[in-house]
Amino acid sequence: MTDGEMFAQVVFQLGPVEISNTVLTTWGILTLLVGASYWLSHHLQQEKPGRIQVLAEGVCIAIEDAIRAVAPNHVQLLFPFIATLWIFLVVANLVGLIPGLHSPTRDLSVTSSLAIIVFLSVHWYGVRDQGLKQYLWHYLSPTPFLLPFHIISEISRTIALAVRLFGNIMSLEMAALLILIVAGFLAPIPLLMLHIIEALVQAYIFGMLALIYVAGGMQTQQLRQKHHQQQKDPSRE
């Protein structure tokens, strides 16, 4: 690993479009995940599931439980998006352990794209669950004067989501580079364990924040409707 390799490098061009090693690594991860999903879906066993199937089912159950703890009424709706995001982040963060490869999430363009996807998903799921009019109304509640603050909040948390993941993964790879330069290969196991733990933690944090943001956008309308119902009928709990 060299200093120049810490940043995305252009591998080739498709006309005016530059294809970097980050893009190629991301394409490779997506191809791997799609291929693995296709293989698993066509090799499911009910009576004697294999170890890979048991592991996959365990991961799905864990993700379902996490979603149920935050949005118990929308588990099936949110599962495809949150599960895909979590699995991609885990693989993307850990791929930096492979010699010659770097984690795509060390590139700000990748983390920004993921943050934008989360930003759009918050509104898409909110509109889908509550309707466009009902969803947009909460930006004017309890007073229209709060609209600028709502907008600033949406933008700032999206930026923070992108920068947090980028900064942590980039600093992790830079720390690994510095340790290898100073100590050589005298301490590969502690470094490897640090990379794995930090990669998993950052994937969990990003996915959980995305889940909280999406669930919050959907449940805000439900709380508002419940509040209005209670105002109309004080005897109703």
Image (cartoon, rainbow, N blue to C red):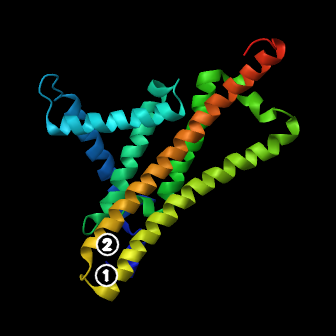
> What quarter of the picture does the N terminus occupy?
bottom left
Q: Secondary structure at mark 1?
A: helix
The answer to which image quadrant residue 102 occupies is bottom left
> What quarter of the picture does the C terminus occupy?
top right
Sort mark 2 into few (<14), some (14-19) or many (20+) by Cα contacts within 10 Å: some
Horizontally, residue 206 falls left or right of residue 64, namely right
Res. 236 in view: yes
User: Is 72 rendered above or below residue 157?
Assistant: above
Res. 12 in view: no
Residue 176: percent from the left, percent from the top? 36, 75
Seen from the viewer's position, the closer of residues 196 and 3 is 196
User: Is 153 rendered above or below residue 72?
Assistant: below
Residue 28: percent from the left, percent from the top? 29, 52
Which residue is rendered at x = 59% and y = 41% of the image? 213
The answer to which image quadrant residue 160 occupies is bottom right
Which residue is rendered at x = 68% and y = 50% of the image? 155
The answer to which image quadrant residue 159 occupies is bottom right
Sort mark 1 into few (<14), some (14-19) or many (20+) by Cα contacts within 10 Å: some
Q: Amino acid at mark 2?
A: Leu
Which residue is rendered at x = 20% and y = 35% of the image? 53
The label shown at residue 191 is: 2
Seen from the viewer's position, the closer of residues 9 and 60 is 60
Q: Which residue is mark 1?
A: 180
Observer-side mark, 1 or 2, equals 2
First in sequence: mark 1 vs mark 2:
1
Which residue is rendered at x = 36% and y = 60% of the image? 197
